[in-house]
Amino acid sequence: MDKVLPINPAIFSSLDISINISPVPCLKGDALLQKSVTIDYLSKKRVKNEGQAKQYYVHDSHPAIIDKEFWECVQLEMARRKQYLEAHGLNSYAHKPAENPFASKVICGMCNQAYGRVTWRSTTPRRVWQCGLRYRRKGVIGCDNRHVDDEVFVTQFINSFKGVGNWYYF
């Protein structure tokens, strides 16, 4: 059963999509049996198996939908992202990454919290990034790090990306 079924690659076009669907072991061809048990056979009431009956894990019980190596990589990435979120006090890894690619990715060097994008409204709206602890409580400055303009992040990222050697994309 080492053969992997061909599927549409558009399903896994984004790593975030694959992370959301891949913790299920049946995708790699394995099965967990007796996840739920019937506690009353007359009323047919079923509950989650929390030790009432033995559970069985069957390897290669059916053809795999995704590669086992890919499934293991996704599990490692999920663990890495969970550790990252806990270390920086975040509750989500990406907030609309297409619109806001730096969200939850830029970390303050002084307090180890993520920078967030805010819009300052004066005569013309100005988008800046500031530390998440900068104004946690109204009127009290929590972190001494200053704000950074949105354009600075974009230009610094492009310059860094050009330094890697992939400059022809820009």
Image (cartoon, helix red, strand yellow):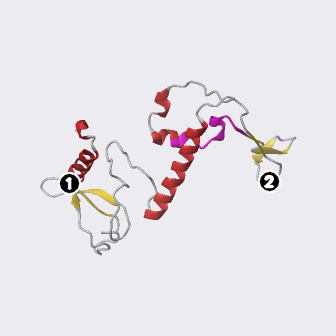
Describe residue 150's horizontal placement relative to residue 106 as left or right.
Answer: left
Q: Position of residue 144 (x, y in %)?
A: 27, 73
- Which residue is pictured at 48% across the width and 39% down the height? 17
Mark identifier at residue 49: none
Q: Are there few (<14), some (14-19), or many (20+) residues within 10 Å of tag 2?
A: few
Q: Which residue is mark 2?
A: 51
Outermost residue, bottom direction?
A: 140
Residue to which mark 1 is pinned: 152
Query: Can residue 131 be seen in this snapshot?
Result: yes
Split into 4 quadrants, where in the image is the N terminus? Answer: top right
**Residue at coordinates 66% horizontally, 30% vertically from top-left?**
2
Mark 1 vs mark 2, CA separation in Å: 55 Å
Residue at x 54% of width, y 44% of height: 73
In-front residue for pair 115/1: 1
**Left or right: where 55 falls relative to 160:** right
Q: Amino acid at mark 1?
A: Val
Could you classify mark 1 by the number of other residues whose Cα lies within 10 Å: few (under 14), some (14-19), or many (20 or more)? few
Which of 151 and 59 lies nearest the eye of the viewer?
Answer: 59
For residue 64, above or below residue 77: above
Determine if the magenta segment contains residue 28: yes
Quarter where residue 145 is shown = bottom left
Looking at marks 1 and 2 on the same chain, the residue that comes earlier in the sequence is marked by 2
Looking at the picture, which amino acid does disc 2 mark?
Answer: Gly
Is any part of residue 22 visible from this angle? no
Identify the residue shown where x is 27% and y is 46%: 161
Name which quarter of the figure residue 74 lies in: top right
> Which quadrant is the C terminus positioned in?
top left
Write down the region rendered in magenta. 19-31
Under tag 1, what secondary structure?
Answer: helix
